[in-house]
Image: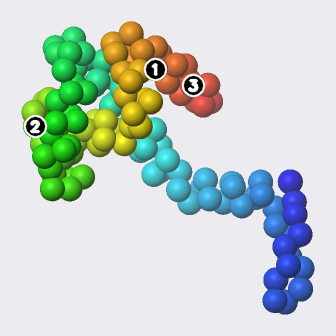
Amino acid sequence: METNVKTKDGVSVLSLKTDFNEMLEKNFAAICKAIAYRGKAIKELVDLYERRDDIIETSIKIARKSEDENAAKMAISKELEISPQTAHFLLDRTIDEIALFNKKELVKMLNDYKANISKLVV
């Protein structure tokens, strides 16, 4: 898809596909790392639900007492014995998303995530 963009030097043609591909190429490693962290976080939460059922309550209590997001992340990581990345994943969720957090939904999320990742692998 192309679109014309007015610039101070006239009109320039912008190719969204080309620009997206360039952005993807430049940031591919970071994108892959983010995808891997999300998958690991979901898997770690599924495993955590095997050990305890007060994950959300504990996370909220710690977040409320913490000075900032980094302190909350580190305290949650220590208290729940999870990676800082998974603690960050928890802190980044909205209330609506947190409401869905139970073992059954997390297992479904993990399976969906794996299925989507497998589609990306060529």
Q: Amino acid at mark 3?
A: Asn
The x and y percentages for residue 29 are 47, 50
Q: CA distance from mark 3 to mark 1?
A: 10 Å
Q: Amino acid at mark 1?
A: Met
> Could you tell me if residue 43 is visible in this image?
yes
Q: Earlier in the sequence, mark 1 or mark 2?
A: 2
Q: Is residue 4 above or below residue 53?
A: below
- For this rendering, which residue is in front, 6 or 97? 97
Whether residue 70 is situated above or below residue 82 in the rendered picture: below
Q: Judging from the image, what secondary structure is the residue with disc 1 in?
A: helix
The earlier-in-sequence mark between 3 and 1 is 1
Q: Is residue 109 left or right of residue 14?
A: left
Q: Quadrant of residue 59?
A: top left
Residue at the spot of label 3: 116
Residue 28 vs residue 40: left or right? right
> Which residue lies under the disc numbered 2?
78
**x, y percent for residue 19:** 72, 61
- Label 1 belongs to which residue? 109
Q: Residue at x 46, y 20 (%)?
A: 109
Q: Secondary structure at mark 3?
A: helix
